[in-house]
Image: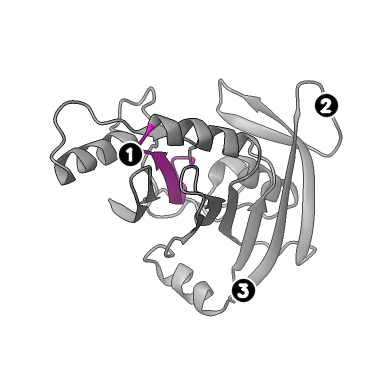
Amino acid sequence: MEVVYEDNHIIIVNKAPGEIVQGDKTGDKPLCDIVKEWLKEKYAKPGNVFLGVAHRLDRPVAGLVVFAKTSKALARLNEMFRNGEVHKTYWAITANKPEQEEALLTHYITTVEKTNKSYAYVSPKKDAKEARLKYRLIASSERYYLLEVNLLTGRKHQIRVQLSAIGSPIRGDLKYGAKRSNPDGSISLLARRIQFIHPVSKQEIDVTAPVPDDKLWKALEEGV
């Protein structure tokens, strides 16, 4: 487990692809339990350790996850995420170059829980939620393109389904149109940077995750 920031109220962890943030029907050990155990051991805490989940990342996605170490921080973080006061920047690798090198995407997303899949529509639809993001092309190789994505709303599988809707599915994301999977089962989407005003101290927090230890990621990062 890689801790990239910690203080008395919050801890930010660099999640590996394949890890789940919270427990689910698979029964696999979630990241929140791993962090709790790490805190318990580090501080020799007796009894249960408080750890609040303020947001999640999809299982095949890597990158930054913020946890609250106090109930005060959790309540304020939850409100900040709801109000769009936490700024998240993602990096995504695609095999298809978008028609525009920079754009604001607006779609209307519905989710089928049974199949755990979202669908994006260009016009409003009953029960669909508006989804907005900005992206820009920041690097490329012979076969792949690196996009920087800023989320303006937080919908289920939003980046994955919106990039797929413009013909640029994320590398390895078979669910949303990639032609082949990644060897490790990940998708090439990284929660790269997170910025917000600390819920208690009011200091500015600005944290960046390293790219995965992978030749393609490293090569594209060098091109930024």
Name the N-terminal-most of marks 2 and 3: 2
From the viewer's perspective, is residue 222 above or below residue 195? below
* Marks 2 and 3, how far apart at CA: 35 Å
* Marks 3 and 1, how far apart at CA: 31 Å
Task: Verify CB contact (< 8 Å) between mark 3 and mark 1.
Answer: no
Name the N-terminal-most of marks 3 and 1: 1
Q: Nearer the viewer, mark 2 or mark 1?
A: 1
* Marks 2 and 1, how far apart at CA: 35 Å
Q: Is residue 148 left or right of residue 100?
A: left
Task: Verify CB contact (< 8 Å) between mark 2 and mark 1.
Answer: no
Q: Nearer the viewer, residue 55 or 135?
A: 55
Q: Amino acid at mark 3?
A: Ala
From the viewer's perspective, is residue 133 above or below residue 125? below
Magenta stretch: includes residue 65 = yes
Q: Dividing the picture into quarters, in which one does residue 84 lie?
A: top right
The location of residue 43, given as percent across then percent down, is 17, 43
From the viewer's perspective, is residue 181 above or below residue 139? above
What secondary structure is marked by label 2? Answer: loop
State the residue at coordinates (17%, 46%). Answer: 42
The location of residue 47, given as percent across then percent down, is 16, 26
Task: Verify CB contact (< 8 Å) between mark 2 and mark 3.
Answer: no
Q: Mark 1 highlights which residue?
A: 31
Q: Nearer the viewer, residue 131 or 79?
A: 79
Q: Mark 2 highlights which residue?
A: 125
Q: Which mark is residue 139?
A: 3
Q: Amino acid at mark 2?
A: Lys
What's the coloring here? one colour
State the residue at coordinates (39%, 37%). Answer: 21
State the residue at coordinates (48%, 76%). Answer: 219
Highlighted magenta segment, given as a residue range: 57-70
What secondary structure is marked by label 1? Answer: helix
Mark 1 burial class by Cα count in 10 Å: few <14, some 14-19, many 20+:
some
